[in-house]
Amino acid sequence: MYSVTKRVFSTGLEEKDMLETGGLPIAGFAMFAIAVVVLAIVLVLMGVKAVPQGMDYTVERFGRYTRTLRPGFHLIIPVIDRIGSKMNMMETVLNVPSQEVITRDNAMVTADGVVFFQVLDAAKAAYEVNNLEYAMLNLAMTNLRTVLGSLDLDQVLSERDQINTRLLGVIDGATTPWGVKVTRVEIKDITPPRDIVEAMARQMKAEREKRANILDAEGFRAAEILKAEGEKQAVILAAEARREAAYRDAEARERAAEAEAKATNMVSTAIAEGNVQAINYFVAQKYVEALKEFANGNNQKILFMPLEASSVISSIGGITEIAREAFAGNRPNSGQNNNG
């Protein structure tokens, strides 16, 4: 009887406690509330996304691409949406490792390079190709072998700009569907085999010696031409000088002949007029000139005088008489002019 009464009493107390707490124990309710709050915070944190500058995030909903998040603050639906890929949108440098290439003329060279590219479309770069950098690396290596293999060794070593341009066009065209822009392709180093390098050195030395010999020959020829031109000009100038001197000598002789003719004419006129002193003047002049020639001769060292000095003196006297008569003849004329 007592035990039955006690069991009923305890059951009533428990039912009373459950009614006062809403049907759950106090400790269980507190744990549930804490779990709900923590879950809400986690969901909020999962829905908040901050995209750094230079990056783009792709958003997938149940595994399917929906949109792209640009740099900045964004909200997504937790659990339903998730970040698919994080793409670097800055220009990136891809090193192409060294590889051996056979040129068109069967020469083995080792070449390497670099590729500069930039992702323009994050969705295409993430979903159109698997492992973008690995794909671009293999594409660059295969096209490098293709381009260098289509050229001769001399072209490979001397036409780097054309090689870079061809590689840029091929790689950029192949990566356009991936949302990538290849901005530059550069060949860093091209190393031919040692024997080819030595042969090229010998060829370069021979070519330089050939050019040196050609330059020496051209310089000698130019010097000879200039020398001949100088001699030609000297001969021409000498001939012109002789011609001018001959012209001047002829002119001088002509003037002297004219003067001589004029003097002879005057003497002949005087003789015709009966003036004997004119003959004495003419003979005295020639005599004095002959003495002058004797005195100036190179072989004439001693001159004995007199050489009929009396004749010379008489001739000089005749010249004096001619002068007196000339002056006497001019005086009446001057007097008549004054009277006039």
Image (tube, grey):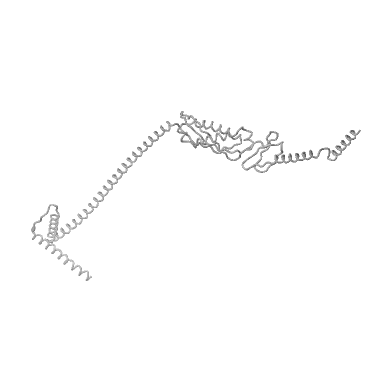
| Front-lying residue, 36 or 232 | 36
Residue 218 on image: x %, y %: 34, 39
Asked if 237 appears above or below 130 in the picture, the reply is below
Residue 167 on image: x %, y %: 53, 34
Apparent side of residue 198 relative to residue 65 in the rendered image (left or right): left
Looking at the image, the residue that sits furthest to the top is 106
Apparent side of residue 308 relative to residue 246 in the rendered image (left or right): left
Asked if 317 appears above or below 162 in the picture, the reply is below
| Front-lying residue, 307 or 169 | 169
Looking at the image, the residue that sits furthest to the bottom is 339
Q: Quadrant of the N terminus?
A: top right
Looking at the image, the residue that sits furthest to the front is 2
**Quarter residue 63 falls in:** top right
**Quarter residue 338 falls in:** bottom left
| Front-lying residue, 157 or 308 | 157
| Front-lying residue, 108 or 221 | 108
Apparent side of residue 232 relative to residue 300 in the rendered image (left or right): right
Asked if 228 appears above or below 272 in the picture, the reply is above
Residue 157 on image: x %, y %: 46, 35
Q: Quadrant of the C terminus?
A: bottom left
Residue 253 on image: x %, y %: 21, 53
Apparent side of residue 10 relative to residue 183 in the rendered image (left or right): right
Total residue callouts:
0
